Image (cartoon, rainbow, N blue to C red):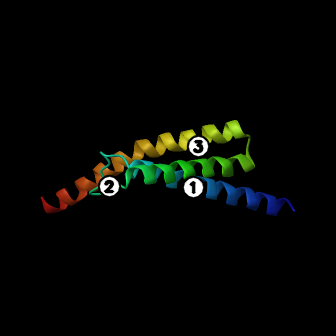
Amino acid sequence: MFENAAMADTAFHGLALAATMAGIVCLYLSAPRQQWLSRPLAGRRSRVVGALALLEGWLLWSTVMHPVTALFTSLTIAMLAFTILPFAAAIRGAAPARREG
């Protein structure tokens, strides 16, 4: 019985992480100065989808932990992703230049 509960918690953690990351990526790709796409995603629609995905991630986190803990977990993941995405784009952009040169 405890194995099924632990497996369900793990599934909720995975889904919450995926929803949170999807929301962050939607918000980042809608920014005018993002470096992953040649043009940003459609502004308002992408921001709404990103916000809804973040809300969904928080709700999924809230099923397995206290809502305040879920909020700070979502915020921590968002800070990490918003920090890594620009650096990953810069590294990705620098890699082809090294191959050519």
Q: Which mark is residue 74?
A: 3
Q: CA distance from mark 3 to mark 1?
A: 10 Å
Tell which residue pokes out farthest to the left in this image.
101
Residue 89, compared with residue 80, is above or below; it is below
Q: Which mark is residue 36?
A: 2
Residue 98, compared with residue 51, is above or below; it is below
Horizontally, residue 98 falls left or right of residue 68, namely: left
Q: CA distance from mark 1 to mark 2?
A: 20 Å
Q: Position of residue 100 (x, y in %)?
A: 14, 62
Mark 1 = which residue?
A: 19
Horizontally, residue 86 falls left or right of residue 7, namely: left
Q: Residue at x 61, y 41 (%)?
A: 73
The residue type indicated by label 2 comes to Trp
Mark 2 or mark 3: name the one nearer the start of the chain.
2
Residue at disc 3, secondary structure: helix
Q: Which image quadrant for residue 83?
A: top left
Q: Badge 1: how crowded within 10 Å, few (<14), some, or many (20+)? A: many
Residue at disc 1, secondary structure: helix
Horizontally, residue 81 falls left or right of residue 90, namely: right
Q: Badge 3: how crowded within 10 Å, few (<14), some, or many (20+)? A: many
